[in-house]
Amino acid sequence: HQHNRIAIPSASSGIATITDHRQQERTKIMADTAPMEVSATAEVDEKLYSRQLYVMGHEAQRRMMASKALMIGVSGLGVEVAKNCILAGIHSLVLCDPEKSTSYDLGGNFYLSGVGQPRAADCRSALSELNPYVDVSVAEVAALTADELLPLIDAAGISCVVITIALPTDLLVAINAKCRENHVCFINAVTAGVFGSIFCDFGESFVCSDKDGNPPATSQIESVISDEENDDCVVIKVLEDQGRHGLETGDKITFARLKGIHGLDTHTHYEVKVTGPYTFEIPSTKLTAPTGPDEVQQGYITQIKQPTTLHFDSYEKKLAEPGDIAMSDFAKFDRPLLLHHAFQALDKFRAENGGELPVPGDQTACQRVLELTKGMSSEDITEQQERIILQLASGSKAILSPMCAALGGIVGQEVLKACSGKFSPINGFLYFDADECLPDELLPSDKVAPQNSRYDSQIAVFGSDMQERLFDLNYFIVGAGAIGCEMLKNWAMMGVACGPKGHVHVTDMDRIEKSNLSRQFLFRNSDIDQFKSTTAAKASCKMNPDFRITPYQEKVASDTEHLFGDDFYSKLSGVCTALDNVEARLYVDQRCLFYRLPMLESGTLGTKGNTQIVVPHLTENYGATRDPPEKSIPVCTLKNFPNQIQHTLQWARDWFEGEFRQSSEDVNSYLSQPAEQYLASLQPNTKLETLKKIQATLVNDRPVTFEDCIVWARLKFEDLFNNQIRQLLHNFPPDQVTSSGTKFWSGSKRCPKALTFDTKNKCEDAEMFNHLDFVVAASNLRAEMYGIKGTVDHDYFNKVLQDVIVPDFAPVEGVKIAANDEEEKNNNNAMDTGDAEADQIWSQLPKQSDLAGFKLNAIEFDKDVDDHMLFVTACSNLRAMNYSIPTEDTHRSRAIAGRIIPAIATTTALVTGIICLELYKLVGTARKELKLDAYKNAFINLAIPFMTLSEPTPPAKTKCMLKGKEWEWTAWDSLDMNRGDVTMGEFMDYFESEYNLEISMLSHGVSILYSFFANKEKVRQRRAMKMSEVIKSITKKEFPPNQLFLTLEVIANDKDSDEEVELPYIRFRFR
């Protein structure tokens, strides 16, 4: 790399023009690599920022890409904020920190090469590798003083200044004043052990373009009438089966695809007055004419997000008058103001002691901070509050990775708000703490004294004994994506599994894709297509060479229990889930229940995040509370009556799967099996349809040239978007009336219209050439199926399409089309009676031997493949145009069809930081036994911003009488039997004598081993067999060599009362 020095770019000219030589020296920047050029109008790299764009949107992303930030302080918190901002893609970040690193910095800064180096310069290279679009540079300053720092704000033309280390109060006031003068957003944040403080001042008037980040509310019109008492007011009711309208009084809306409503238009923004969950009024608006007798009222309503102007007070004013400080834990109502005074007391202590914070465990210094705090508080400080202040003072030097991650996520998002104008900033102060991790009293100074190791920060807070316990942890992390990367980084910094007895196991089946790089920060461009688990393990070991970790590429499910089985889980301290689906979480949850292991659970959805700590016997398990299942789209809605873009996208994706994957798989299955065996495998009710598809794919429509593929695609267009619609209207004419007298095509049923093919047709919403796009995409996918070379040359397509002969349409009589779900269900239940036709098609299919070696390429839909999305988007939009549904562009369609979960690095960092604080509690707090209220589950939304920490729910209890005593058991409990592989008779005798219970039924999974009504001879035989042999004889399966336990369910009655006793499962160790 070349070592260049350039001046800081300014907002106006691109390069700052500074006449004073000394000022030039202060504002020099060190840079190794030139970033990719980006401007406010530049194209966004949708492959890289794919998931983040569904959080921020294109406009906010472009504003970030044109913004510059100045960061003062690059210790643990600073590097976290820098990482998050660089991954998000701001234009440039200037690092300013000449201070030399200490062993305390190593607790949170994962990019330092060691101690004794200037922190900013030492981190710059590693930070710059995170995103090639971002210019990461270092401001050369001699010291962190007003003379050195204030010119940087004048010269740089920056959007935001973020300070992440403790600076003197007068210097912070001066920097804040300079920021307000230059209309620059100001953020100050510090961590001190398990305590953190954030302050934001975005100026006198900061314009927020979207205060909450929620998608605009949408609904569909059921009726529009004039207000009976006021002609200048329109009353609108929305379709209740589509959900509530989600509007508030004062919101503005716009309409689309209006039918039968005269006086409203699609170009005006209307202000609403809400009168109910399904109704609202539009004042000062008139309907110009009533709805005609042949018309129906229909239309779409979309909320218009309104910008908001926010006012902020200066740092100096808020320091003196903090006002209402945001809450992060509603169980600690007194905490924000207490910490407000305590952090100021720390600043005063530093001023009295030459800029130094208290030495860990120094009782005298801690008492001085307590005195200073009492001097600022107008109320008496309780004994419990004194403990908080003393702990804050004692651990104030400590830089803990989980705290840096948690605050780094919050502060990183505040920087992005400053740069993009999107989401509501923190207004004033926010304090956060995890004092439940701390002992009740200060630890002795010898237990918290620095050892000149990378763990000095943790030792300062928790003591050396706890550090040893962290070394010895054995954890299993399932998933190495965004949460997995952040978690492994935190663990490497914390020293988890860094001792000879410790180990981390990480598994992930996925390989790295480009879209991962904006969140999964352990990966680089050069890692694309490598396994995530292996790459993440290597990267985390680079941060801490003592980190002991083994990567796997296996899913965690019942079919991998030979690998992750009894012997594996029995050696673990706990499990961490870093998964993206509920099904896998529920499986891991069951494993944790069985082995009584704690589970660290977290998840994100855009700016929203949650954490759940699962502690054996103390909290409920993850699966104890479940969200309701997602509503599926009714089949008849998909087939014939769509009214939302979600319906047309699902239909398009289903058609893709059927035409380009299923048809290929059917042909390949037919060709690869003996004829009679294949025929016997077909289901009777789908046999005819399957054989028709094979005949079409293999014989009737089999292409030879790419031109054949184009002809096929053009005819498919005609069939799907013209002929089928005309057939539907033949069955249900536009003027059809139901038996109840209402119009058939009304409410959510939208009367369709057939499309006439036109390569120049452009839809009004998404502005896409869907007609041509459909043919281009379908032709190329068809060619790919058959191994034919395709092209996207539009001139070639236009030439071929001119010569395609399209047969005239004639409606078919007797075609059954279901008008509702009940009819659809009845149609599906009707067995296919076309045996004669199926036999005829079967006899006409080519013999497998004639096509030896022939195989079609089955194309599986992938949302990240542009060719796939072009087809699905065009196909969906054409169907939407059939039904007058607003169309969507490829970006939005990708999110819906691909069920993409919006994601951004800031939320991921925050939830992993919070859950790692819970890990401290699991490891064990010195001199303190933790109860349920010490653990915290979190729900956060960085957009609002909102955070709430709450006590977990205890497990539900079941009461029963056992051995004459009442026993309350939970999902964590079982009846454990460790008597070896005894016979079933010995097992039953022991159970009945031990618990005074008579077994009426004994089962393993779905297999009944014993029941009171079973054949007596069979029972006699089984009682003589070993338990494992009984199960093997029934299931016909061998046990993996690593399986130690059998899970048995029992129904039993009390011998004395003959009442059935509700029992947990039996955990039977047979090896």
Image (cartoon, rainbow, N blue to C red):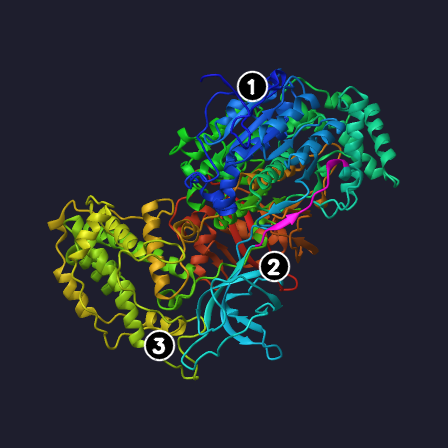
| Residue 949 horizontal/vertical position (percent) | 67, 46
Give the vertical position of 933 relative to 176 (above or below). below
Residue pushed farthest front?
19
Please say if the residues under marks 1 and 2 sit with CB atoms less than 8 Å apart.
Answer: no
As measured in the structure, the alpha-carbon distance from the residue carrying label 2 to the one carrying label 3 is 61 Å
Q: In front: mark 1 or mark 2?
A: 1
Between 502 and 1067, the one nearer to me in the picture: 502
Estimate the x, y position of residue 262 in percent, counting from the top left.
47, 73
Frontmost residue, 451 versus 624:
451
Q: Of marks 1 and 2, which one's residue comes earlier in the chain?
A: 1
In magenta, the rendered stretch is 306-316
* Residue shown at the point (25%, 77%) measured from the top left: 814
- Look at label 1 and name its amino acid: Ser
Residue at 70 percent across and 33 percent down: it is: 176
In the picture of the structure, the residue carrying the numbered disc 2 is 1062
Locate residue 777, reporting x and y percent: 28, 50
Amino acid beneath label 3: Pro
Q: Quadrant of residue 817?
A: bottom left
Work out whether 1064 lies above or below 355: below
Mark 3 or mark 1: whose residue is earlier in sequence: 1
- Residue annotated with mark 3: 734
> Is residue 570 visible to the viewer in this orientation of the structure?
yes
In-front residue for pair 554/171: 171
- In the picture, the disc for residue 113 is 1
Give the label, 3 or 1, closer to the camera: 3
First in sequence: mark 2 vs mark 3: 3
Mark 2, secondary structure of its residue: loop
Looking at the rendered structure, the kind of residue marked 2 is Glu
